[in-house]
Image: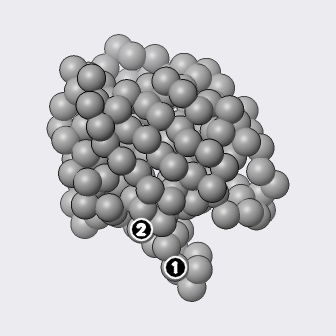
């Protein structure tokens, strides 16, 4: 079982990867994490009663704020839908309108959101640190759902 630890400025969030559901998505995430792609990125979108989203490299630069939510790794990953439901603690890939447009952005579901089922690729499940996700999702936010206080992924590590 492969574990991901996201060390944030609010504490750690740990989740297990689910390669049996989304092998290419897991491979992509592991490759990005091991290359330190996620280190220093922000959870740039928080919606109470729904989820926290991060993984955009544009969030490393305040001057790119108008482009937060639009960045990625320069490649896309094909959608891998499964029967796994988007319940609290599920980690899933964010994307644009095209189901095959996911790249690096992901979200952690903080409240059951089954309306996302079969629309987004589930690739992980939180095992520890949902209290941290809850702190982040409840941060004061602006009109674009961006937290007013930085919620930074200081370091993202992969371990067995």
11 horizontally vs 79: left or right: right
139 horizontally vs 88: left or right: right
Question: Residue furthest toward the top?
Answer: 83
Is 125 or 97 nearer to us in this picture?
125
Q: Position of residue 85 (x, y in %)?
A: 46, 17
Q: Quadrant of residue 113?
A: top right
Q: Position of residue 73 (x, y in %)?
A: 29, 63
Badge 2 crowding class, 10 Å Cα cut-off, few under 14, some 14 to 19, many 20 or more, is many
**Residue 72 appears anywhere in the view:** yes
Q: Name the quadrant of the C terminus.
A: top left
User: Going 31% across and 42% down the picture, which residue do you hit?
Assistant: 158
User: Going 49% across and 73% down the picture, which residue do you hit?
Assistant: 60
User: Going 49% across and 24% down the picture, which residue do you hit?
Assistant: 127
Which residue does the numbered mark 1 point to in the structure image? 61
User: Going 58% across and 23% down the picture, which residue do you hit?
Assistant: 88
Which residue does the numbered mark 2 point to in the structure image? 57
Disc on res. 137: none
- The answer to the question of whether label 2 and label 1 lie on touching residues, with beta carbons closer than 8 A, is no
| Position above or below: 157 against 91 | below
**Residue 101 appears anywhere in the view:** no
Badge 1 crowding class, 10 Å Cα cut-off, few under 14, some 14 to 19, many 20 or more, is few
Q: Position of residue 33 (x, y in %)?
A: 31, 53
Q: Name the quadrant of the N terminus.
A: top left
Q: Position of residue 145 (x, y in %)?
A: 70, 55
Question: Residue furthest toward the front?
Answer: 160
Q: Under tag 2, what secondary structure?
A: helix
Is 129 or 142 nearer to us in this picture?
129
Q: Under tag 1, what secondary structure?
A: loop
Spatial distance from mark 2 to mark 1, Cα to Cα?
Answer: 8 Å
């Amino acid at each position: 079982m492969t574990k991901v630890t996201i060390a944030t400025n609010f504490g750690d969030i740990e989740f297990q990867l689910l390669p049996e559901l989304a092998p290419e998505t897991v491979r992509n995430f592991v490759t990005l994490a091991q290359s330190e792609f996620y280190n220093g990125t922000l959870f740039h979108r928080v919606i109470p009663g729904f989820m926290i989203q991060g993984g955009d490299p544009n969030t490393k630069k305040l001057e790119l704020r108008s482009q937060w939510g639009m960045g990625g790794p320069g490649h896309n990953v094909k959608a891998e839908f499964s029967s796994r439901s988007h319940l609290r603690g599920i980690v899933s890939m964010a994307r644009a309108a095209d189901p095959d447009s996911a790249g690096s952005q992901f979200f952690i579901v903080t409240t059951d959101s089954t309306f996302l089922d079969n629309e987004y690729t589930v690739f992980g499940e939180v095992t520890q640190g949902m209290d941290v996700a809850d702190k982040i999702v409840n941060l004061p936010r602006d009109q674009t759902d961006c937290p007013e206080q930085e919620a930074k992924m200081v370091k993202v590590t992969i371990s067995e």
